[in-house]
Amino acid sequence: MYCNNCDIILTREVRTTMKYNIGDIVECKVTGIEAYGIFVSIDNIYDGLIHISEISEGFVRNVNDFVKPDEIIKANIIDISDNKKHLKLSIKNIDYRDPSKMSQIEDSAHGFELLKEQLPFWTKEKINEIESED
């Protein structure tokens, strides 16, 4: 492995002391959203950026369509700046949302009951409207 910032080739021993490795999937928290990407916090030491080009294979019109602030997501490490404690990340081609952490709509005790109760009135109203047009 080559270290971009120090112009040396890292030995196997040095690589194993690093906390993260390229290809690892890490859990992170969205800390900021900009037009060009998503800022995340991985732990108390490392932070990261998911560049807009690493969000989706398709065209990304709005980064906010993919994540929300404070959301916990998973990301794939594509590059590491260990001395700066910064990770370049990707959410392309991975299931980056944990279904158990996504907000879910709570079922109402009434469900469709309110609509069911109103349907006869709406139907009668519409029939009267149509008949009055003739």
Image: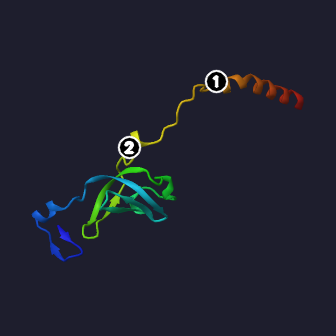
Q: Can residue 134 be seen in this view?
A: no
| Residue occupying the point 47% across, 61% down | 33
Does 18 sit left or right of 39 as displayed? left
Tell me the CA gap for discs 2 and 1.
32 Å
**Position of residue 97 measured from the top left corner of the image (x, y, whole percent):** 39, 46
Q: According to the image, label 1 marks what residue?
A: 113
Give the image location of residue 52, x and y in percent: 43, 62
Toward the front, the furthest residue is 44
Secondary element at tag 1: helix
The quarter of the picture where the N terminus appears is bottom left
Q: Position of 55 compared to 122: left or right?
A: left
Type of amino acid at the residue the image marks with label 1: Glu
Q: How many marks?
A: 2
Disc marking residue 61: none
Which residue is the site of mark 2? 98
Q: Which residue appears at 14% of the width and 69% of the height? A: 10
Q: In which quarter of the image is residue 98?
A: top left
Q: Where is residue 45 in the image (x, y as percent from the top left)?
A: 29, 62
Q: What residue type is labelled 2?
A: Asp
28 vs 67, nearest the viewer: 28
Q: Pick the residue in front: 108 or 4.
A: 108
Q: Which residue is drawn at 67% across and 23% down?
A: 116
Evaluate whether residue 40 shows in this view: yes
Q: Position of residue 39 (x, y in %)?
A: 41, 61
Relative to 86, does residue 66 appear above or below in the rendering?
A: above
Mark 2, other Cα within 10 Å: few <14 / some 14–19 / many ≥20: few
Q: In which quarter of the image is the C terminus?
A: top right
Q: Is residue 111 above or below residue 20?
A: above
Helix, strand or loop at disc 2?
loop
Q: Which of marks 2 and 1 is nearer the N terminus?
A: 2
Front-most of residues 43 and 3:
43
Residue at position x 34%, y 54% in the image: 75
